[in-house]
Image (tube, rainbow, N blue to C red):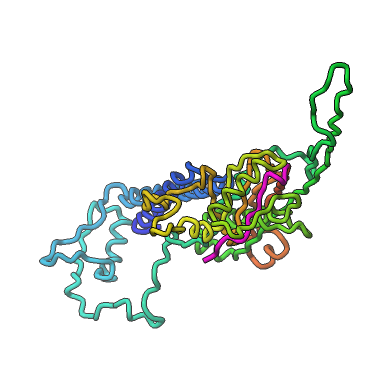
Amino acid sequence: MNKIEIDAKQRQLNNQKKILQADLVRATKSASRATLDALKARGDALIAEQAELDEHRATYEKAMKLSDMGGAKGFEVSSTETANKPASLHISEADYRGLYEAVQKRLPSYRIEAKTIDAITKDAFGTGDFTSGNLPPALLPQLTAELPYEDDDIFAHFLQEKAPEAHSVEYLRHSGNTNPAAPTAELAQKPDLGMTWTTVTTSFTKIAALQEFSDEALADFPYFMQIVPSEMFAALKDARSDQVINGDGTGANMLGLLNQSGTLTRAQGSDTPIDCLRKAVNDLRVGSAYSRANLILLNPTTWADLQLVKSSQGLYVLNPNDPNALGDLDNIFGVRVVANTKVPAGKAIVLDTTKAVLAWRRSGPVFDINQYGDTEWTHNSVSFRVEERVAIGVRYPAAINIVSGLAVS
């Protein structure tokens, strides 16, 4: 690499470092383990690129010192009347031969009378003179637009438990008593509660994705090695959230919250949307789970409809005194609202996360690279794989209330 290429590469690395620093600042607030691993991978790649560039710079500077040739300070160029500096194309072949002999003989100096650009009569070569068209545009890796995914991670809202070394999780659910506790007279028979216990089993669900690139694509655009891990981890999180909400339990699918049996339900009916949600919160409190709602999951469109509800006087119902603060509103009657596109529009999931759902991560998220598989070896490609095994367990279905019939605009 020459000095111009080294300096250009350094500027590119500096820009990537700034982008990574900004991503790290945002990630310190609330970031999943997958996001942090992806940021670390980007940082490691930048460190490796910087080390390689430093080696090129050291090699270049060493070459410049060796060109001194024991005291010869290169060649001198006589001053000209023009401000234009001479270039390599302005030096004749004879002058080059003389310069070579001077270096071989270790002469202290050698003078070249270089022509100025004014002395060249050939028309200047322009960017439009290429036979194939103009110069190609510059590809700026730091401006690569990654595919957007759902930002919220539903799985992260639940109680995280240590996963057992097994293919599934089994636990007991105390589902009720045959008899209640009651006042008892002296020496009288005490009531037998007759506890009812149910065994619940939930299997781990594997969520995975593959991506393959040719060796040439990775060599010609090394930035793929930085963005591919983060993109694949984001796709994994997106699919996980969809499974937690909508999984139907068939085949390899998880049994999601919307398809659990025993959950409470409420339809909006003649209630206003806000009244309906407040009653759904109360359903949990007076139901068999005796739970206190602390999370409402909504589709962003449904949440927007609720925020825009107005009174007959045109005031926003959720915050009539300060409409400008509606964008900062994150709760209804003190219950936190989380918007996630995986929740179907018109529905709401009201739950008590301290009782309702447990979450286990059996393995991963794991990111693997393989270039020695049969196809990879014969086709000169590299295969990337990301996967994890997770499970959720609904301990108290009655601590979840599925609300339907909300307005969808």
Return the residue found at the far bottom. 131
Q: Is residue 385 visible?
A: no
Q: Position of residue 85 (x, y in %)?
A: 20, 64
Left or right of 269 on screen, residue 123: left
Q: Quadrant of the N terminus?
A: bottom left
Location of residue 141 by image quarter: bottom left
Task: Say whether residue 243 is magenta.
Answer: no
Left or right of 141 on screen, residue 77: left
Taking the spot 85% from the left edge, 36% from the top edge, the residue there is 178
Return the residue found at the far left. 81
Taking the spot 73% from the left edge, 59% from the top edge, the residue there is 248
Left or right of 217 on screen, residue 88: left
Q: Is residue 272 visible?
A: yes
Q: Position of residue 25 (x, y in %)?
A: 44, 44
Q: Position of residue 48 (x, y in %)?
A: 49, 48
Task: Pick the residue in front: 292 or 108.
Answer: 292
Taking the spot 17% from the left edge, 75% from the top edge, the residue there is 119
Task: Pick the residue in front: 13 or 320.
Answer: 320
Task: Pick the residue in front: 408 or 391.
Answer: 408
Taking the spot 79% from the left edge, 40% from the top edge, the residue there is 175
Number of marks in picture: 0
The range drawn in magenta is 396-409
Return the residue found at the far top. 186
Task: Say whether residue 401 is magenta.
Answer: yes
Q: Position of residue 312 (x, y in %)?
A: 42, 59
